[in-house]
Amino acid sequence: MNAPLGSQVSDAAGEPRTQQCPCLQRARKTPWYPIEGYCLALDEGGLRVVTIAEFHELCTTPEHARCELYRRRLGRASAENDRQGTGGTP
């Protein structure tokens, strides 16, 4: 059974983490766009329309860590933080 969207779960180290991808921008479901979000993980602030399957199986679950775009954004954020000498998340 899945936890409610946005709920907190713990990782292997016991640290709380949000179940939903931090790159997911919530949106209102419409007849033309039948899911409630889109992806902001693209380079230079672009957005990506996700499939219904991606939304349900990746974006709104801890499985978002498997997403290639999320991993690339995480890598870019890490590299940028290294250059600036700071830590943080995407």
Image: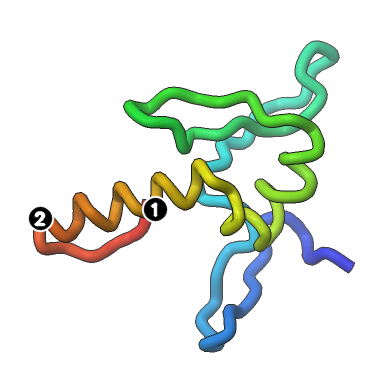
Residue 82 x, y percent position in the rendering: 16, 60
Q: Are marks 2 and 1 in contact (CB under 8 Å)?
A: no
For residue 67, side relative to residue 35 (left or right): left
Q: Is residue 36 above or below residue 87?
A: above
- Residue at 65 percent across and 74 percent down: it is 9
- Residue situated furthest right in the rendering: 1
Residue 18 x, y percent position in the rendering: 58, 63
For residue 79, side relative to residue 38 (left or right): left
Residue 87 x, y percent position in the rendering: 23, 65
Q: Which residue is mark 2?
A: 84
Going by the numbered disc 1, the residue's amino acid type is Leu
- Residue at 66 percent across and 33 percent down: it is 37
Marks 2/1: CA distance? 15 Å
Q: Residues within 10 Å of mark 2 (few under 14, many from 20)?
A: few
Q: Which residue is mark 1?
A: 74
Q: Is residue 11 above or below residue 58?
A: below
Residue 8 x, y percent position in the rendering: 63, 70
Going by the numbered disc 2, the residue's amino acid type is Gln
Give the mark nearest the N terminus, 2 or 1: 1
